[in-house]
Amino acid sequence: MAQLNIKNLSKVYSGGVTAVSDVSLAVENKEFVVLLGPSGCGKSTALRMVAGLEFPTKGDIYIGDRLVNNVPAKDRDIAMVFQNYALYPHMKVYDNMSFALKLRGYSKRDIDKRVKDAAEILGVTRLLERKPWELSGGERQRVAVGRAIVRKPLVFLFDEPLSNLDAKMRVQMRTEIHKLHLKIQATMIYVTHDQTEAMTLGDRIAVMKDGKILQLDTPLNVYDRPINKFVAGFIGSPPMNFMEGRIIKKDSSLYFDEGKFKVKILAQMYDKLTDCIDKKIIFGVRPEDIYDKLFASYATAENTLIALCDVVETMGAQNYLYLSTSKHTFVAVTDSSNKPSTGNMVEVVFDMKKIHFFDPATEKIIV
Ligand code: ADP
């Protein structure tokens, strides 16, 4: 297996679209890195350049110590799994999985062992004699993954491999890919726009926007310490709530003043906020850090607010409360054992340890 090193990679398509802009990324041996971002941010283009399916306008790609910029895709020792499976429709599963090995001149015995081992790992042994049209979407994707693993490539590339599956199958295949990574310990790069896939699969996540990597870190760090408002809003479901307001100082305490409510900021954040007093600021709080007052033993007048309950979505273990002050709407994820009534006022409590502030001009994190 191998490291992958991308240095200052850019891609400008012939129409003048800059799809990838000066991206650098070092993926460690056996690491699982997810490229995450909204549609059109350049994830697939970056992956396709690593695969050798697109050529960089600028920058270098190393697989191990080898510069591969001018190495054709077939000689890069990588395997790519696509969203649309890309199986050969007229070939049986066995032949789909063995095709690349045959082309490379492997012996029949070696091919048979590799295909059967891969089939076993992926639970498709009983499907080896079927044709792709006789398989479900999930089974086809398993075969597509099998076709990649038989070659034991240096690096695996996945381009939104679960997008064509229904919700249940997507969750199941996500777990399978996670197990596969643990089992075969390969270097993997995985492209998705789905933050749950990124959080659950990645050793590290590269959050991309407009062709650039904004933040590269572990899932927990990206969640707890987002570098800016975009990353904060992209990671987490339902997304982080943002409210514009001001920092005000009263006696020697700092408060966030939304206009309709005020909450007291914890002293440990004061250092970073001294330049923000009496200025506009963006307050961020995740829905899961807002509690129904009934269940918040630490509720005080200074972390509690009253809001109108516009809608309640019952999710089973939790409720999603869609709340509003007259200035902002926001979402709280609360314990389902109390269901507030739509149209009533509810008291909710912010976990003030977990809040964030962002600069309204640059959208960078302040604290
Ligand atoms: P993502 O995978 O994040 O959805 P892509 O890498 O597919 O994004 O695309 C990034 C940008 O490059 C988009 O604006 C897209 O329209 C553009 N793009 C992608 N492929 C081509 C192409 N072959 N020719 C011109 N523009 C392209």
Image (cartoon, rainbow, N blue to C red):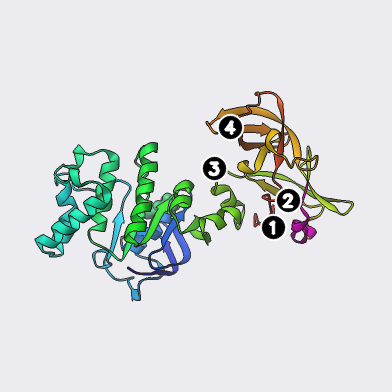
Whether disc 4's CB lies below 8 Å from ligand 1 is answered no
Amino acid at circle 2: Ile
Amino acid at circle 1: Ile
Instruction: State which quadrant residue 170 falls in.
Output: top left
Characterize the magenta stretch by its predominant secondary structure: helix
| First in sequence: mark 4 vs mark 3 | 3
Amino acid at circle 4: Asn
Q: Position of residue 83 (x, y in %)?
A: 33, 47
Q: Please count the marks in the image.
A: 4
Instruction: State which quadrant residue 262 falls in.
Output: top right
Q: Which residues are magenta?
A: 264-274
Q: Which residue is labeled 3 in the image?
A: 237
Picture quarter with the C terminus: bottom right
Q: CA distance from mark 4 to mark 2?
A: 29 Å
100 falls in the magenta region: no
Secondary structure beneath disc 4? strand
Q: Which residue is labeled 1 in the image?
A: 366
Q: Which residue is labeled 4 in the image?
A: 319
| First in sequence: mark 4 vs mark 2 | 2
Q: Callout 1: few (<14), some (14-19), or many (20+) C-alpha neighbours within 10 Å?
A: some
- Which label was assigned to residue 281? 2
Whether disc 2's CB lies below 8 Å from ligand 1 is answered no
